[in-house]
């Protein structure tokens, strides 16, 4: 009768313990509180002298170390010492396996993968060397499983909240960055000039940028730029560059002075860790003079329609932020008397993954520009053929395009 009462008492204790833990989980108590209740059940109620609970999340962590040396768990090689155990194992007879004596190893699995290990030591023996703990190992395994799965679910939930917050911040950053770039409908399109553009960041935010600034009634300034690298840091530097460009680029400033000041600002912001390549120009509607500097950027393609001549505008200086001071700035000038097209782009358009390497080339661009079609049609054709909006896997960088048509003496006709 006494044995039956003891079994009933033990069963009631285990059910109450599981109920208590389940209610705590439902009440969303903290991880620390769950571990505290788990420790109390094992040490106070089951009289376990030493226990360690190691759990895997993003990495292996020690959630509980009661009774063992404080740094004991740090000396355990999880792969070598624990992954070999796939079921409850009594290892008292193997004193050399761990730096400190461990009697029982209890693996905890979820979906057939180990998510935790319970190490028990200093068990009390009675009778003929049989410990009462042996009667509880399956219960300890079940309890450990409930605890560790609940803690992992809490971690995954917190991680999902963090990822969602990051996603929302990135979406906001993307919207803000897009606001810095002129909308296509606001680009100049009149009898003196026609501009069209395209912007496609590889991630939510990018390091590409183009801008158009009306300097006065008869003159417009424009640029296209690319920050080395990708992601948030590139986007922040580009935003800073946009603010500096708009503050400095005026009808009175000389191009050489403008580039020197921009270089100084980029050096102060990037501290030499990043740099910016750009093509920057100003065009006068009356004189039809194009004044430009290429600062280490992909040379824009210039096509004179009547002569069918294609050239690249590559002269200028080094990129912004590459050197403390610019050793030279070659300002170039062209008089555009005949109808022509200027195609400015960032390297994401011409650097694509192919096979095991990266291919670079402008032949495809040149083929689509050497015709009498307007610049808008040319850009749309290039976007379609490169499958940019279809998510081509060959593309691995931001892409920006700024296309300009100049009418020449007799207008666009």
Image (tube, rainbow, N blue to C red):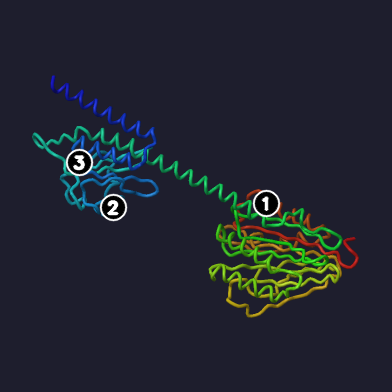
Question: On the image, numbered disc 2 is attached to which residue?
Answer: 77
**413 left or right, relative to 144:** right
Q: Residues within 10 Å of mark 2 (few under 14, many from 20)?
A: few
What residue is shown at x 21% (from left), y 48% (from top)?
Answer: 68
**203 left or right, relative to 284:** left
Counting residues from the N terminus, which is met first, the one under dot 1 or under dot 3? Answer: 3
Task: Give the Cα distance between marks 1 and 2.
Answer: 49 Å
Question: On the image, numbered disc 3 is attached to which residue?
Answer: 90
Counting the numbered discs, the total is 3
The image shows residue 57 at horizontal and vertical percentages of 38, 46
What residue is shown at x 73% (from left), y 62% (from top)?
Answer: 212
Give the quadrant of residue 149: top left
Residue at the bottom extreme? 327
Counting residues from the N terminus, which is met first, the one under dot 1 or under dot 2? Answer: 2
Element marked by disc 1: loop
Q: Is 259 or 202 nearer to us in this picture?
A: 259
Counting residues from the N terminus, which is met first, the one under dot 2 or under dot 3? Answer: 2
Q: Is 119 or 360 nearer to us in this picture?
A: 119
Question: On the image, numbered disc 1 is attached to which residue?
Answer: 387
Task: Pick the quarter of the image with the N terminus.
Answer: top left
Element marked by disc 3: strand
The image shows residue 153 at horizontal and vertical percentages of 41, 39
Give the quadrant of residue 39: top left
């Amino acid at each position: 009768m006494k044995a039956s009462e003891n079994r009933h008492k033990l069963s009631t204790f285990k059910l109450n313990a599981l109920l208590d833990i389940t209610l705590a989980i439902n009440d969303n108590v903290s991880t620390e509180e769950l571990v505290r209740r788990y420790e109390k059940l094992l040490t106070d109620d089951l009289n376990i002298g030493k226990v360690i609970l190691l759990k895997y999340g993003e990495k292996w962590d020690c959630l509980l170390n009661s009774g063992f040396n404080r740094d004991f768990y740090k000396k355990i090689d999880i792969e070598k010492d624990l992954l070999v155990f796939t079921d409850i194992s009594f290892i008292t007879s193997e004193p050399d396996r761990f730096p400190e004596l461990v009697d029982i190893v209890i693996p905890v699995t979820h979906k057939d993968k180990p998510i935790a290990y319970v190490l028990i030591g200093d068990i009390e023996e009675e009778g003929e060397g049989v410990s009462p703990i042996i009667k509880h190992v399956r219960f300890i395994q079940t309890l450990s499983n409930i605890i560790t799965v609940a803690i992992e679910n809490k971690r995954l939930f917190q991680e999902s909240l963090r990822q969602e917050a990051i996603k929302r911040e990135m979406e906001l950053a993307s919207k803000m960055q897009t606001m810095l770039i002129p909308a296509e409908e606001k680009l100049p399109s009149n009898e003196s000039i026609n501009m069209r553009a395209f912007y496609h960041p590889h991630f939510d935010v990018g390091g590409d940028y183009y801008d158009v600034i009306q300097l006065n009634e008869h003159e417009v300034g424009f640029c296209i730029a690319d920050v080395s690298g990708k992601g948030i840091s590139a986007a922040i530097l580009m935003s800073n560059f946009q603010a500096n460009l708009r503050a400095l680029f005026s009808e009175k400033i000389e191009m050489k002075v403008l580039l020197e000041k921009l270089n100084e600002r980029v050096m102060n912001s990037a501290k030499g860790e990043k740099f910016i390549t750009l093509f920057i120009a100003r065009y006068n509607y009356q004189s039809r003079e194009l004044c430009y500097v290429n600062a280490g950027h992909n040379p824009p393609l210039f096509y004179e329609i009547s002569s069918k001549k294609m050239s690249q505008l590559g002269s200028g200086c080094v990129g912004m932020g590459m050197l403390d001071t610019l050793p030279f700035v070659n300002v170039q000038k062209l008089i555009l008397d005949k109808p022509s097209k200027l195609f400015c782009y960032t390297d994401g358009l011409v650097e694509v993954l192919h096979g095991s390497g990266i291919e670079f080339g402008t032949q495809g661009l040149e083929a689509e520009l050497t015709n009498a079609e307007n610049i808008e049609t040319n850009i749309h054709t290039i976007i379609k053929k490169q499958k940019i909006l279809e998510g081509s896997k060959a593309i691995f960088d931001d892409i920006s395009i700024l296309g300009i048509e100049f009418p020449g003496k007799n207008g666009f006709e």
